[in-house]
Image (cartoon, rainbow, N blue to C red):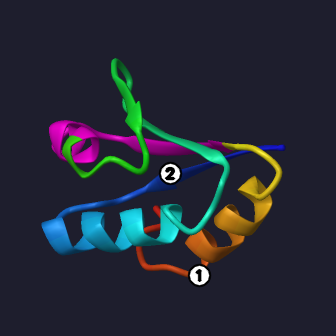
Amino acid sequence: MVVERKVRLHSLNEIKDFILIAGKYRCDIKVKTLDKIVDGKSMLGIISIVGRKPLTVVANGDDAGDFAGQLDRTKYLYQ
């Protein structure tokens, strides 16, 4: 299963919280911008692109739907 969500991550605390959520799941999680893709479980990777907009999270794997469900309940989801 592949799921995609747009997110906002502005501070180091938000990035840390996002990574803690992502780390609970086995699925492959990527965060991408228009021109760069990084590991969604990597603090340094996400920090390197956080100033760019928009941020899109793509999760691929058996528990990607569960990850997306938890992400949907956070304040990071871009609405």
CA distance for labels 2 and 1: 13 Å
**At numbered mark 1, what does the secondary structure look like: helix, strand or loop?**
loop
Percent from the top left, x then y, of residue 11? 15, 67
Depth order, front residue of 70/79: 70
Residue at the spot of label 1: 73
Where is residue 46 shown, x and y percent of the image? 27, 45
Residue at the (63%, 62%) spot, across then down: 25
In which quadrant is the N terminus drawn? top right
Q: Which residues are magenta?
A: 45-59
Residue 70 appears in view: yes
Inspect the image, locate mark 1, and give the three-letter code of the amino acid beneath it: Arg
Indicate whether 45 appears above or below 15.
above
Q: Quadrant of residue 68?
A: bottom right
What residue is drawn where x is 15% and y is 66%?
Answer: 12
In the displayed structure, does residue 66 sit left or right of residue 55? right
Of the two numbered discs 2 and 1 on the same chain, state the one appearing first in sequence. Answer: 2
Residue positioned 37% across, 31% down in the render: 33
63 is within the stretch colored magenta: no
Q: Nearer the viewer, residue 36 or 23?
A: 23
The disc at residue 6 is 2
In the rendered view, does 59 fall on the left or right side of 75?
Answer: right
What type is the residue that disc 2 sits on?
Lys
27, 76: nearer the viewer:
27
Q: Is residue 48 magenta?
A: yes
